[in-house]
Image (spheres, coloured by chain):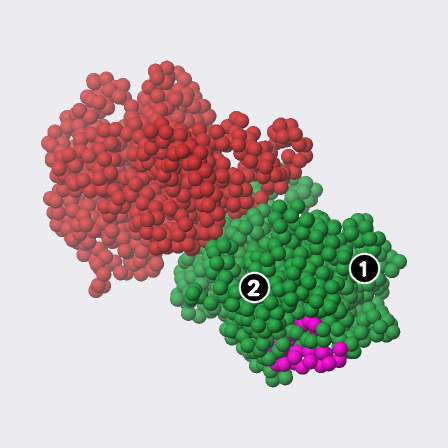
Chain colours: A green, B red
Amino acid sequence: MSKVKRVYTFGDKKAEGNAGMKNLLGGKGANLAEMNLTGVPVPPGFTITTDVCTEYNEMGREKVVELLKEDVKAAIENVEKIMGSEFGSRENPCLLSVRSGARVSMPGMMDTVLNLGMNDDAVVGLTNKTGNARFAWDSYRRFVQMYGDVVMGLKPESKEDVDPFEEIIEALKEERGIENDTELTVDDLKLLVTRFKKAVKDKTGLDFPADPWEQLWGSICAVFDSWMNERAKYYRQINRIPEEWGTAVNVQAMVFGNMGKKSGTGVAFTRDAATGENIFNGEYLIDAQGEDVVAGVRTPQQITHEGSLRWAKLAGISEEERASKYPSLEEVMPEVYKELFTIQKKLEDHYGDMQDLEFTIQDGKLWLLQTRNGKRTGAAMVKIAVDLLREGKIDEKTALLRQEPNKLDELLHPVFDTKALKSAVVIGKGLPASPGAATGQIVFFADEANKYPASILVRIETSPEDLEGMNIARGILTARGGMTSHAAVVARGMGKCCVSGAGNISINYKTRTMKAGDKTLKEGDWISLNGTTGEVYESKIATIEPQMSGDFAGIMKLAEKYTRMDVRTNADTPKDAQTARKFGAKGIGLTRTEHMFFEGERIKAMREMILSGKEEDRRKALEKLLPYQREDFEGILEAMEGYGVTIRLLDPPLHEFVPHEEENQAEMAKEMGITTEQVKAIVDSLHEFNPMLGHRGCRLGNTYPEITEMQARAIIEAACNLKKKGIDAKPEIMVPLIGTVEEFRLQNQIIRKVAEQVFTEKNIRVDYLVGTMIEIPRACLTADKIAEEAEFFSFGTNDLTQMTFGYSRDDAGKFLPVYIKKGLLKEDPFQVLDQEGVGQLVKMGTARGRSANKNLKVGICGEHGGEPASVEFCNSVGMDYVSCSPFRVPIARLAAAQANIR
Amino acid sequence: MSKVKRVYTFGDKKAEGNAGMKNLLGGKGANLAEMNLTGVPVPPGFTITTDVCTEYNEMGREKVVELLKEDVKAAIENVEKIMGSEFGSRENPCLLSVRSGARVSMPGMMDTVLNLGMNDDAVVGLTNKTGNARFAWDSYRRFVQMYGDVVMGLKPESKEDVDPFEEIIEALKEERGIENDTELTVDDLKLLVTRFKKAVKDKTGLDFPADPWEQLWGSICAVFDSWMNERAKYYRQINRIPEEWGTAVNVQAMVFGNMGKKSGTGVAFTRDAATGENIFNGEYLIDAQGEDVVAGVRTPQQITHEGSLRWAKLAGISEEERASKYPSLEEVMPEVYKELFTIQKKLEDHYGDMQDLEFTIQDGKLWLLQTRNGKRTGAAMVKIAVDLLREGKIDEKTALLRQEPNKLDELLHPVFDTKALKSAVVIGKGLPASPGAATGQIVFFADEANKYPASILVRIETSPEDLEGMNIARGILTARGGMTSHAAVVARGMGKCCVSGAGNISINYKTRTMKAGDKTLKEGDWISLNGTTGEVYESKIATIEPQMSGDFAGIMKLAEKYTRMDVRTNADTPKDAQTARKFGAKGIGLTRTEHMFFEGERIKAMREMILSGKEEDRRKALEKLLPYQREDFEGILEAMEGYGVTIRLLDPPLHEFVPHEEENQAEMAKEMGITTEQVKAIVDSLHEFNPMLGHRGCRLGNTYPEITEMQARAIIEAACNLKKKGIDAKPEIMVPLIGTVEEFRLQNQIIRKVAEQVFTEKNIRVDYLVGTMIEIPRACLTADKIAEEAEFFSFGTNDLTQMTFGYSRDDAGKFLPVYIKKGLLKEDPFQVLDQEGVGQLVKMGTARGRSANKNLKVGICGEHGGEPASVEFCNSVGMDYVSCSPFRVPIARLAAAQANIR
């Protein structure tokens, strides 16, 4: 009928889709198809494409249901045929799951409905078929609850609100005088179904639908709706997922892990998602449905025997207790385990990457529910790629492209100083859910994560609502939940340190305290987490900088091989320069000279210079500053020996240097032999309405050429002194805030004149460049003219973004978050270079500059120089280098290599 | 020898150049050539081209002299032949003048040397030839003085310094006990020459050159040097004359107006330079050299009899006194007058424009020294062009192109209120040197003109050093000097009100007082000048707005005929709108709504809105503002009935509206029932580091949509109400500060939704447009996207200039003047649109906008919309309209017509 194919079926080792169709079928849908094609046992079903999600948002529910109707009917018939059951039947009911599935995984973000097709008829059928009334009615109860939540809108809006269904359960448990859900009888469950339906009717005025088809359409549409819910939107924002992608809907025959002792469910990873080690691992629960594992309500058991032993050791559980209460799947169902092991191997080989599997065992039969590339920590990302490369399963380029540059950040975060650790007091231990070290002040509620500059979120367990707070906190500690709990999975995805399931910790949300053994800590107290060992420490612990070695170094070496652009660093001190060099920086893209003016005597001389009314007096003060500057430059040029060092001349408005407090003003007045009133008057006269657009940058050097003269002299003298010592210094003098070629020409003349003077005085010459920062729109527009005079351009994309957008970075906090929330901006343009607007100017500036001066060296020194997408853009524009802060250097190097490969 | 022709000769009704060669020969040189070709008696000579000036600045003196040597020698021989005299000869000496002459006249700016060739031999020759030893020695004395000043550097640097030559003269007069120069004997003059030469030797260590050739080269080079003197640079700056143009040098045989009673010199205008009336007029002096007339040292006499009578009446001089002491040339030398009258007619006809002539009568023979298009007031400019058009001497396009748009400004300045004038006290009367009305506080020194916001510069006479101060003062009053004195000529050029030669006024610079009859006024006292009548009034006088009528209206009608672009106005009130309409505005290009929030109750409601933490409270406060806004919009839409009215939504940061003083904060706190501390805290939270780039413009409307809703409602309701009254209101709603299409889309949706609501409520529809201000660089770069949604663009070139240059207009005062002085910027980009940089964005924005939406209406509403060069640019870009302040509307209309003709 319709020419567009909207529904793709799979089952019984056949499938209409395949792994290559992720954009259309979503990650989950494509993999379900592919798993079938690989010959893995997967419950049959079908996928509604992501395009339909877009149609849904555009055309609305009714039209889309109409468009889908026939295809879905046919697909259900196919499921029924394969499963030998019938949708909504009293005899042999076929139950379905309905799940979302976008191109990339968004764990816990969108809605799912399980046990669909359940009604008063089907429950009878299921009872008869399984001989397990309790299971059947519990499934019914779960379905009504889930459908009521997701489709009929009874889900509480925030965590403070009570879930009406949980309230009903609690009430009944009280009536019955019991504590656990498992103590509820079949009749209790029947009563719950009745009460649940009444609650729905009371709240919505609608009858709970008995018709399986109505249930099906309700669930499909609810999944589409959930693409636009607030949580999902926020997740897309921080993960930069476009709204247009949409989600697919996967409808699949239910298989049950909660059909008794021979059933179970679990998740598994083909390699260790935290460390990257090639160890099959995972967790499962007997007699449970999938969400029980992920939600962290029950403590899950390990799949492998080895893993189980290790886990028990970490959790401090005796072998006796482990073997009796938490045996591994390998021990409990050795046949199933063997099949699972074979399948995981097959799937990893098939996909050529570490897989994250979901499986269910129904009455002894293994079903694979999902496989996907597993989320992993930065360390695991590096190790897995290097291992797969070594194993010959992927090539070098693939290994490089598998790296998510930002994730390297985790490897560059501080780790605890081993010395400091020795005196640290361990107050608890949990699972090493996401590695790294974190120190911060305790908060108990995710929406209070920003209460302290560094906070640790402490929760019994986390849920998707906590996402925003988890992103803000430095680390996450949970009392319950395993390695695959929500907290663990999300934290690993964020590269955030996490210790989960720390059993000795009990949390009291009301009093905002936690007990760890005999210690009681309250909100605001400092704790530290080691996500690599699972240890929880009392108070702050000092950290040290990480090293770049092992597999990390290997990946970096590989990046070097495939890169075209150099990566430089922004560094103001020899120490920073050394750090960056260690990380592979090839030169300095930006040295700010202004920080050098603040220490001790320097600031006095600087102030004297600014407060002087006459050039003569300014020159005297500058004389005092000269030796300091020269010394600073010697240090930094020496640290970067052999590589170019771009030194920016004085940039900030003079106002930033003068004393604003009366006391300091009086001191300066005394120093200079003038009155405090005079000092105050000069300070006041320096006030600016918009200092960002005021008397700064080369405007200072052009109105007070003596400043430029002093700085140029300090740089050239430093280089000459080093050369005499046999050190190869390569200064590149950068004039900031150029808007017209005339401004540059004047500065260039001053600098070159001073350089010649110094060469004559010292009887030695050094090579140096004079170039400019391109950070004003007008400079991009007239770049051809400027390039006739300048030897290099360095794009200052921070200021360029400020002026191109008309956003003051200091003030944009008032509207940028709202803008991003409302979708007026996809991303913060100060974090990710705005290629559409600012990028045009960068492109234009580069092209026009090169057209006038084909030897023009072009780079970027704004903070975008360390942001992968922006680095890729810089590569495409043809820049010679990017420059970023020392700890972003490896990230930029990787991004530069990836950009070049792509 | 050299292929480039550097020297152009003229004389005896032959010339190598002509009037078309102004760029090469300068205005004066081209006209000297042309006058020869026209058959007018002109002293022979030659012109060294303006290109040589550039060569001089590049290659230096020696090389240029070398290049010129042969050609100059030949040219001198030509002069000698025509004059029958010999350069430096003891028998029949040929004396020369050396004068500057740029493309456009720069009166008094550069140096001149007269009587060149004079030495101990030539003075004998001249004595013998003329039989007038006094004249010969006075010429010698003058030459040494002038050459010493100009070439040898004895000119005092500022007016405070004493001229060493004047000092010598004063000393000698004291020795002799005489008062006037004329009482000096021939021997005295000889003594002066000796003493002058000694002064030169003492000061410079150099002998005064006797060799005429050395004198000649010294003078030629001095003229080239004077192109780069500070006065000339400043003049070029305010008159926007490029430095590259250079000056030509005109060397010409001297003729003498100071050879006795049958000699004289004068300047004349073919029409009245102040009023434009077709009356031949001018001034002369008997037995004088040219500079005596211009310098205003002696009171000059009128050329025509009629003029003389009129002058005497104005100056309060009896007919007896006039006829004896100040007879006209017409009376004194009727034959010469007749010849002069014929020549002036011939020259005006030849050039087709009002001429400014310089002539000398040497021993009864008339010589024309110069003719050029005469400087004139705005009124004269209009009248002369309209008259010439009427007389059939020029066509319509020429008449239009003859108008200097900025000069119309004079016609739009206030004139005295005739009622207020009745009670005004006249304290003096001078010549109506430059028309208009001025009221201000007295200053006596040009460099103190900025001492008061409105100052009147009162001087005995002015000189070129006073230029900067004259430009700042509101009006100029001199005690000495005629209609062609320095003060008068310069003031007319500037369109500045000037009364010159007010004889009853005596000025004491030392006590900083002036006496006018029996009144004594001191610095800072208010006076008023009527430059149209020559009257000087005590104290302030109220002024009224001018009318556009007569010839002015005629020129405007002509402009209308040849224009393509519309001219709109920027107006915030019905009164402004009416004024602009009177001046021919076709619509409003910018109505700022923020001013409307400041009056009375409004500011309270506005503050309440801002200080409210909740949307609900903001809405309540906005409700209160709605009726005010609606009323304002009704007024302005009605005033512009039939034309589009662009209303800009709220633009400035909210900070501008809140109370900053504790008292007002307390009042608001009381009003709103919160504490003063709360108010203070909110006010503080609104503080921004760079408000220009902060939370303003559409960023307000997008974060607080309720503001946009209220404003849109007020506008649409106003238009609906007017339509019901039969008034054709055409609102165009303008969203400010758009940087992304998403921002515009959201605002557009809000506005259109509100409009539909109002239409439904009022059961009537009106046409309206929704567009945006293009004032952020990013908007220009993404104009194609924005134009898909917007119906019009209005370039806000004030902000666009701020962001493209990175200049805060409020702060740029710290460096812009230095930048202009140093030549880093040719002009203030806030006054004249920077076509090279900002212009690219305007062009790009227009082209890209139109490429996406061919019906896009495009205009400009920045202040550049009233600046002629910028208007021409807007025309070239293809804009539909420019918009400017009401009083700039005629200027913009004229500029628009001229742009279209060109």
Residue type for callout 1: Glu
Q: Secondary structure at mark 1?
A: helix
Question: In the figure, residue B303 lies in which quadrant?
Answer: top left
Q: Which mark is residue A249?
A: 2
Q: x%, y% of residue A207?
A: 62, 50
Q: x%, y% of residue A268?
A: 69, 73
The residue at 56%/63% (across/down) is A249
The residue at 75%/69% (across/down) is A260
Whichever of labels 2 and 1 marks the residue nearer the N terminus, that label is: 1
Q: Main secondary structure of the magenta part?
A: helix
- Residue carrying label 1: A183
Outermost residue on the right side: it is A518
Q: Is residue A822 visible?
A: yes
Q: x%, y% of residue A81?
A: 57, 72
On whether residue A811 falls in the magenta region, the answer is no
Report in which chain the residue with disc 1 lies: A
Relative depth, front residue between B646 and B598:
B646
Q: Nearer the viewer, mark 2 or mark 1?
A: 1
On whether residue A360 falls in the magenta region, the answer is yes
First to last magenta residue range: A333-362
Q: Is residue A187 above or below residue B500?
A: below
- From mark 2 to mark 1, how far is it between C-alphas? 35 Å
Question: In the figure, residue A728 lies in which quadrant?
Answer: bottom right
